[in-house]
Amino acid sequence: MRSIPYIHGLHQIGAGDYVYLHPSGTWCRSNSGLVVDGDEAVLIDTQFGLAEAERLQQAIHATRPDTQIRAVVNTHGDIDHWWGNQLWADVPIIATAAAAEQMRQDRWWQLINDLKAPVPAGVREFLNGIGEAFDLNGLEPTLANELFVGERELQVGHRTVQLIDAGPAHTASDVFAHVPDARIIYAGDLVFSDTHPVIHTGPVDRWIAACSQMLSLDPAAIVPGHGPVIDSAGLLRFRSYLEHIRDHAIACQRKGISVWQAAATFECSETAHWSDADRVVINLAAVYRENEPTDASVPTELHLLGHVDATAALQG
Ligand SMILES: [Zn+2]
């Protein structure tokens, strides 16, 4: 498969397969997918906020003016994948029941908008960095309304899209969309490329297994939730990163080393150029918590977000 330039906008990756890329891939800059047959299409993830969702909608209209979006899929419950749903509120919005529950319990709307909401040190600056970088005017978070558990098959014209929940991994439920006739996987946040992922929930071993599951489908192209489109070699590198995180966390935790010290000594030569390296400590802490759930000395993800400079990341 030819390489797809990492440029903001809609790109064709197969006969009826598209990706909407949103560089740089850092916080809330996610990718969307579009699978088309004839005048029907399914949209996979809807960007973050109305302004970006409208850019996505306009790009689709400019490229495929006769195409109607028949359904939307939300790969998981993180806000940067469904806070554009509002524009497609009149079609089925499909997600797993667990992802929909995360959307229903979403606290980010309140945290971003209520400047007095109590948050750990540094987190207000993180939230302000997000709030300033994105236009969230007019946004009414619109929940998925057609739910499934496990797997579901969608028809787009004569084509089939398989929705497979391979979580919990990145979040409580993480769907990837497999398009067998094009050998394309829209991976949601089960895959990041050229940027460190975030382990919100784990277990990390299930995430590693999800990578193996996707590799077993022999995809020609994998569209990550964040970052450029990759091939199987890129997915192997990503799986290897997760294995490094797991193994380093386990080794350091056994020696009684703090997550901060563990992050300072984390090395993964293949991914040394990836952006958002401040997520390493978040990921190591997730594995620490997974192995020792009652260890109160391991900082929570929200506390660790207080050490992330979102403004700098979003300017980069
Ligand atoms: Zn996510």
Image (cartoon, helix red, strand yellow):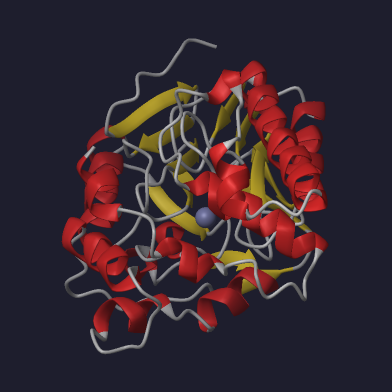
Relative vertical location of residue 219 with respect to residue 92 in this rendering, above or below:
above
Residue situated furthest front in the rendering: 256
Give coordinates of residue 63: x percent, y percent.
Answer: 28, 33
Horizontal side, residue 211 vs residue 70: left or right: right
Quarter occupied by residue 186: top right
Horizontal side, residue 119 vs residue 58: left or right: right
| Residue 198 visible at all | no
Quadrant, the C terminus: top left
Horizontal side, residue 63 vs residue 218: left or right: left
Relative vertical location of residue 271 with respect to residue 246 in this rendering, above or below:
above
Give coordinates of residue 199: x percent, y percent.
Answer: 61, 53
Relative depth, front residue between 154 and 294? 294
Q: Residue at x 26, y 86 (%)?
A: 114
Q: Residue at x 32, y 68 (%)?
A: 122
Q: Residue at x 55, y 44 (%)?
A: 280
Quadrant, the N terminus: top right
Relative vertical location of residue 68 with respect to residue 141 in this rendering, above or below:
above
Q: Residue at x 61, y 25 (%)?
A: 268
Quarter occupied by residue 265: top right
